[in-house]
Image (cartoon, coloured by chain):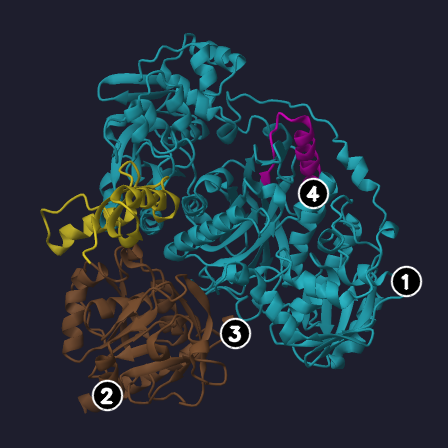
Amino acid sequence: MSDTVVTLDVAEKLGLNSEEFDKIKEILGRTPNFTELSIYSVMWSEHASYKNSIKWLKTLPRDGKQILAAAGEENAGLVDLDNGIACAFKIESHNHPCAVEPYQGAATGVGGINRDIFTMGARPVAQLNSLRFGELENDRTKWLMKGVVKGIGDYGNSFGVPVVGGEVYFNKCYTTNPLVNAMSVGIMKKDDMISAIAKGKGNPVYIVGSSTGKDGIHGATFASADITENSAEDLPSVQVGDPFQEKLLLEATLELNKTGAVVGMQDMGAAGIICSTSEMSEKGGHGMRIDLSKVPLRQQNMEPWEILLSESQERMLVVVEKGREKDVEAVFEKWDLNCEIIGEVIEEDRLYFYKGEKLYADVPASTLVLGGGAPVYDREYKEPAYYKEFKKFLIDDVPEPENLQEVVKVLVKNPNIASKKWVVEQYDTMVGTGNMSTNFPSDAGLVNIKGTRSAIALTVDCNSRYVLADPDIGTQIAVAEASRNIVCSGGKPLAITNCLNFGNPYNPEVYWQFVNAVKGMSKACKKFGTPVTGGNVSFYNQTSIDGNVVPVFPTPTIGMLGLLKEKNNQMTMAFKRKGTMVYLIGKSRNDIASSEYLTTWHHIEKSPPPYFDLDEEYRIQKVVEDLIRFSLVLSAHDISEGGLFISLLESGIPKCMGFDITTDAEVRKDAFLFGEAQGRVVVSVSTTRETEFIDFMLQQDVPFSALGHVTKGEIRVDDVSYGFICDLTKDYTESLGAVFQDN
Amino acid sequence: MKFIAEINIMPLKALLDPQGKAVTNSMKNIGFENISNVRIGKHITLEIDADEEERAMEQVNDACNKILANPIMEGYDYTIRKVED
Amino acid sequence: MKFGVVVFPGSNCDHDTVYTLREILDQEVVELWHKDTDLQDVDMIILPGGFSYGDYLRSGAIARYSPIMGKVIEFAERGGYVLGICNGFQILCEAGLLPGALLHNQNQKFICKNIYILPDNNEAPVNRLLDKEKPLKIPIAHGEGRYFASPETLSMMRQNNQILFRYCNDSGEISEQYNPNGSVENIAGVCNETKNVFGMMPHPERAADDELGNTDGRLILESLIKIILEKKISYYN
C-alpha cells in the first residue's frame, strides 16, 4: 500500500484540498509518496492543526504572571500555585468516538487527558467531566449515557483519580452526537516540569507503553488504493482503553522524571508517532531519524504509514540524555512496560522515517505543525436569522402559572436540574484522600494539596442554551458562572482551559457562533483575570433531526482552576442549622429568559440569554469573596439552572433543612423563584453575626436583600407551604436513576 | 421443541484485549512458561423454543447481533443442540 | 509500630494508606514492592485498595500470586497481622487467608459513597476498642464488594465472632435497605479464625484526615495499633 501512486485524487480522499496538495509539493520540491502524503493529511487535519480555529484562538487572553506554560506550547496548561507548586490542567473532547462506542470512547478520552497531565511530570489529583446527551426518554440517549458513564468510571476508578466535579445536560440537539469533555488536573513541583521537546543531537528517542496496532487509521486506509476485504477485517473500528497500563505508565513516568535523564516527553494521542515526533522536534528546533521496524507491534504486517498514524492508546515518546539509557530502561523494566529506542535526535529540521534500511518518508518537521507550515484559514461567518428572532421574546407574553408548587414538582425532576447522583456514585470521588467536598458540598470541587496550607478549586461550566441565544453573552456567562462557583467555594479564580464544541466550521452561521463565543470568552477572561491555558476545539458536532442536519448547541465548555491560599477558607453550599438567616447577594429581576422553567413548563425555546452584566457580576463576586474571607457567612451557593428556588433547595438538602422566604412584590413570582438572571448568590448568616453582615454589605456597591430563614424541614414561600425538604429531596435525587430502572 | 445454544463471545482479534494481555504476562510470573496469547471472552448458554433448528439458529444470531455481543468489538460463534425430553 | 504497605501494579490507595499511617497516625511505614520477598521486619502488613493487575480476570486473582504474597501468607500463618482494604480484602480471599469471596455488586455497578458500618463484636484487634452501638461513617468504592460465603461457613464465622462489621444506617439499624452491594447478612468486613487477618470493603484510610471532615475511620486504625502494641509489649515482657 505504501506504493500507492499519489495523485490529487488520493490527496482528496485523504481529506486534503488541491491548494494543500500543491503546498506539500512546494515544501518537498517533489510529489510526496503515499507515506508522506498520509503524514501531511493527519498533521494538517482539523484535529491536529486547528487550521479553522487558530486565527481566533490567538485572540484569547493567554498571559498572566501565574502562567508557567504558554497555551498550546506544552501537553497541558501550567499554573503557578506559589510555594514552588504548580498545577497542570486541561480539558479535551472525545465526542465522536463516544457516538460510535460510548464505553470505550469515554474510557479512552479519560485516558488521553490524564496522559497529557502526567506527561508533564504532574500527578493527576482530580478529574471533571462535562457530558451532553439527547432527551432522556430516548433509548439511544440511555444507551449512550450508560456506556459513557461506565466508561469514565471504569477507566478513572482503576487509574485511581477522583472525579470532583462535572455537569450533565440533556437536549435534543445532542441526540446522535453526544458531547463528552473530560478534564484532568495534576499537581507537581514547579521545577519538575517535563517539556514536550526534542533536542540534543544523538539523544535516543524511546517509545514506551502499549504496542502499536492499526487503531484509528481508517481515513488513510480507505484512501489507499488497494484495500481488500480481508484487510478491512483486521482494522479496529474502535480503540480499547487499558487503565492498568496507564497506571503503570503514570508511576513509571513520575519515577523516570526523578532520574533527571529526561530531555522531553509527549503523550501519543491523535496522529500518534508522527504527531509526537514532529511536534517535539519543531519545538526543539531539531529533527529525528526513526526506524519504524523497532516499534513494538500488536498486529502483524503493518505498513510504515500505518505505524506512523496509529492512534493506539497508552503510549508515549520520550527523548533521553545519551548515556543514561540504562537508568531509563531500569524504570520501565521495574514497571513491566515496553520501552524501545526507535531512533535519535538530529540537528537538521528533518524527520527521516526508515523501516530497516529503507527510507519511507523524509519531511521537514516544522512544516507539519501548527505555527509552522500547517495551513491557517480565515473562514467566513454570518449572523443567523434566529439571533434577532430570539431577542423578540417578551416576558409579558408568558402567562404566570397559578400553582407554583406544581412547577416546583416538575422542575426538581427535570434532568437538567435534578441530582446527578446516579452518575456520580459510579465514579470514585474519594481516592487520593484529597476531595474536601465529599463531606462539605460546595459549588466547585475542592482538592486538598497535602503538606501545604492550600487547596485548589475546580469546576466545569457551560449553559449551551444561553450560548445558542447569544454566543458572546452566553460564553461570558459560562466563564462568569465558573468563576462564581470557585468564589462561592472560598477560592480565587486563576485560569481556564476550554473545550469548544461546535458544528461544521464551513457553515458560516456555525462559524459566527464560534467567533462570537471566542469574543465573549476573551471579555470575561480579561475581567476575571483568568487567562486561557489551552484546551481543544471539536468541530463537526451535528445531529440529524427529521432529516435536517442541525449543529449541536454551540458549547464552549469552560474548565476553571482556582486557589484557596488558606484551605480553612473553604465554604460549603449547605445550610447549617435552623434559624440562620438567608440573604440574596445580587438583585432579583423580572427575567425568565432561557430558563429551564421557560423551556420545561412553557415549552418556549426561543428567548435571549438571561440578564447578565459583566461588571456587576465581577463586583458581586468580589463581595462574596470578602464575605467568606471575613467569615460573615455560613454557606454560599450560586443561582443557576432552576433559579433561586432550586438553589435554596440544594443548600437545604445536605442537612435536610427547609427554608421560609418572602418574595419581592416588584418582581413576578415565577421570575423571582425560577428565573435565571445571572450575578446572584444565596448566603446564610448566623443570627449572631447578622448585624455585622448587614453593616458590611451596606458599605458595598452591590444590591442585597433578606430572603428569610432556614427551617427544620418545611419549605414556605410567602407563608404558603411548598412541602417538606425530605419529600422534594427524594424526587430531586432519585428521578434520574429511576429512568434507568435501578439505583 | 427446545434447543440449547452454547455461545462463545470473543473480542475481535484486531483489538487490544487488555485483560488477556495482563493475564498472559502474569502466566510467566506464576510459572506457566509455555502459555501465551491469552484472550478472554464470555460464554453464554440459553434455551430457545423453536419449531426447527434453523429457526432456533436465526434467533441466536439475532440475539447475538442485537444484544449478547457488541459487533463493533466482539465476534461470536455457537453450537446448538436439541434438549432431550 | 512498623507497617508494611504492599504495592501491587495497579494499587491506587497505597499512597493514601501510607499517608494516613505516617502523617496522621504517626506510625513508621515502609512500602513493600510486589516483586520483593523481604518483609523488612514489619509488625503489620496492609494490602491497600486499588485495581491490582487491572482487576482483570477476577479482582485479586492475579495479585495473589505475586512473589510478596508467598511471604505474606507465611507471615499470617505465623500469626502476623494483615489487613486488606477493598482490593486488599479481595486478594486475601483469593489467597485463602480469609473465608468467602467478593462478587459483583448486586446492581452491577461501581458504587462510591459514604455508608455506615457497625462493629459486630469486640473480639478482634480491629474492632476491640469500638463502640458496638455507634455506627461509623466510612466511604466505600468498589464494583466487586458483595460478600458471599456458604451458610455452613457463615454459621462457623458467627460462632467464632469472625464477622467484623455490618452495613447499617446512620442510627445503627442493620437491614437490607442499608446494604449497598447485596452482601450476605450485610457483611462489610471479616477476619480469619485466629483473628490476625482482617478484610473490609470500606476504606478507613479515607475517613481519617481532619481536613476532609470525617475521621470515623481513624478509630478503626487506632484500635488496631493500640491492641497490637499492647500484645507486642506483653510478648516481649
**Residue at 74 percent of width and 40 percent of height:** A470
Q: Is mark 1 on a helix, strand or loop?
A: loop
The residue range painted magenta reads A500-525
Q: Mark 2 near mark 4, Cβ–Cβ under 8 Å?
A: no
Q: Disc 4 marks which residue?
A: A467
Q: Which tint was used for chain A?
A: cyan
Q: Disc 1 marks which residue?
A: A666
Checking the image for residue C213, the label placed there is: 3
Q: Mark 2 near mark 1, Cβ–Cβ under 8 Å?
A: no
Q: In this view, does C82 lie to the left or right of A86?
A: left
Residue at the far top: name it. A30
Between marks 2 and 1, how big is the CA–CA gap?
A: 71 Å
For the residues beneath circles 3 and 1, the answer to whether they share a chain is: no
The crowd level at tag 1 (other Cα within 10 Å; few <14, some 14-19, many 20+) is few
Q: State the image coordinates of residue A471 (x, y, percent, origin top left).
A: 71, 39
Q: Is mark 3 on a helix, strand or loop?
A: loop
Question: Please, what is the three-letter code of the amino acid marked with disc 4?
Answer: Val
Between marks 3 and 1, how big is the CA–CA gap?
A: 42 Å
Question: Please, what is the three-letter code of the amino acid marked with disc 1?
Answer: Glu
Q: Mark 2 lies on which chain?
A: C
